[in-house]
Image (spheres, rainbow, N blue to C red):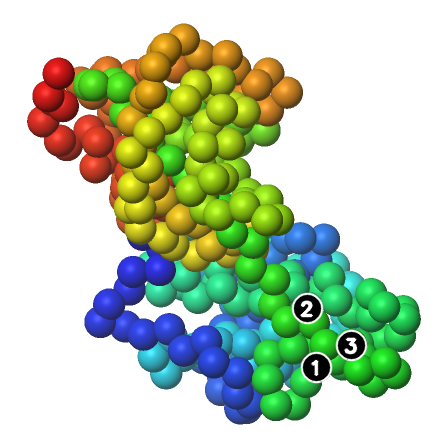
């Protein structure tokens, strides 16, 4: 998955340091990130590409750090640089850039949403002692937002419940039921609710599978497996789901597990022998 980079190590604790020419330079505008176009993909710009612009430290992987642009420079970028949707980060060829850029974007996006105090409207400032935005007027302190999400692989003997949201950009594949956890409910309750809301079925034997950070939606995703409990007829939530269907194990194509827990859950089911009747 995207966060699995061993033996390399992500350092995401708050600290301050000065950039070096080969550290990474993060600039976001309108929920897009500036990347440098290469012959076959994209790469994240380096400090040496924008040496005169102010910036501040975000994170590091091993000894290579990521810095966020502090300038208010909105002049057009020339050359091979483009502002692209953050989804492009998960396709970068270098897996360290893939994780580093995604986590850095998560922090940068959070900062961009908290430039002004939600309590009194005063301009916020970065804390000098921790990763937080602080209002100097009323002392309101805002920490990075991490939203819990659940995703579930529902088994029905040798069939897997697969679906695709209406707004999902990849129309060539099916995925799994998922959704944000509501206030006041547990992860397991969220799993039952999401499956009922989106597919109209009951489930049982909900079991934890694993988790992963998902910076693209400011989330931490908890993965589960479950079994059908009762009638397998699906009642699709048409306001959110484009398609939901039971897919036999032998009909599921191979999924790349290097990025998402969704693919890991699908591959875990696909590679298992047929469930006992």
Marking on residue 126:
1
- Taking the spot 46% from the left edge, 27% from the top edge, the residue there is 195
Among the two numbered marks 3 and 2 on one chain, the one whose residue lies closer to the N terminus: 2
Write down the residue under mark 3: 140
Asked if labels 2 and 1 touch by Cβ distance under 8 angstroms, the answer is: yes
- On the picture, is 64 further left or further right than 4? right
Q: Mark 3 or mark 1, which is nearer to you?
A: 3
Q: Neighbour class for label 3 at 10 Å: few (<14), some, many (≥20)?
A: some
Residue 157, percent across and down? Answer: 21, 19
Measuring from the top left, give residue 136's x and y in whole percent: 83, 85
Viewer-proximal residue among 277 and 84: 277
Q: Residues within 10 Å of mark 1 (few under 14, many from 20)?
A: some
Q: In which quarter of the image is the C terminus?
A: top left
Q: What element carries label 1?
A: strand
Q: How far apart are marks 3 and 2 (CA)?
A: 15 Å
Find disc 2 in the rendering and name its residue: 111
- Location of residue 201 with respect to 222 vertically, above or below: above
């Amino acid at each position: 998955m995207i966060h699995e980079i061993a033996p390399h190590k992500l350092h995401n604790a708050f600290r301050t340091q000065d950039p070096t020419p080969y550290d990474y330079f993060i600039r976001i505008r309108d929920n897009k990130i500036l990347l440098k176009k290469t012959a076959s993909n994209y790469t994240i710009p380096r400090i040496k590409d924008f040496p005169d612009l102010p910036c501040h430290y975000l994170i590091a992987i091993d000894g290579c750090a990521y810095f966020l642009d502090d300038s208010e420079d909105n002049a057009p970028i020339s050359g091979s640089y483009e502002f692209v949707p953050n989804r492009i980060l998960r396709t970068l060829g270098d897996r360290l850039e893939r994780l580093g850029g995604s986590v850095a974007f998560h922090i940068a996006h959070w900062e961009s949403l908290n430039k002004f105090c939600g309590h009194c409207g005063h301009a916020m400032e970065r804390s000098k002692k921790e990763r937080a935005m602080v209002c100097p007027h009323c002392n309101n302190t805002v920490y990075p937002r991490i939203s819990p999400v659940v995703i579930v692989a529902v088994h029905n003997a040798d069939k897997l419940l697969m679906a695709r949201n209406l707004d999902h950009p990849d129309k060539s594949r099916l995925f799994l039921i998922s959704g944000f956890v509501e206030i006041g409910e547990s992860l397991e309750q969220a799993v039952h609710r999401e499956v009922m809301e989106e597919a109209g079925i009951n489930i049982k034997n909900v079991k934890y599978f694993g988790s992963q950070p998902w910076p693209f939606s400011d989330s931490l995703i908890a993965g589960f497996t479950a079994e059908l409990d009762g009638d397998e007829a699906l009642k699709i939530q048409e306001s959110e789901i484009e398609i939901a269907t039971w897919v036999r194990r032998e009909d599921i194509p191979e999924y790349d597990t290097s990025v998402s827990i969704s693919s890991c859950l699908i591959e875990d089911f696909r590679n298992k022998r047929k469930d006992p009747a």
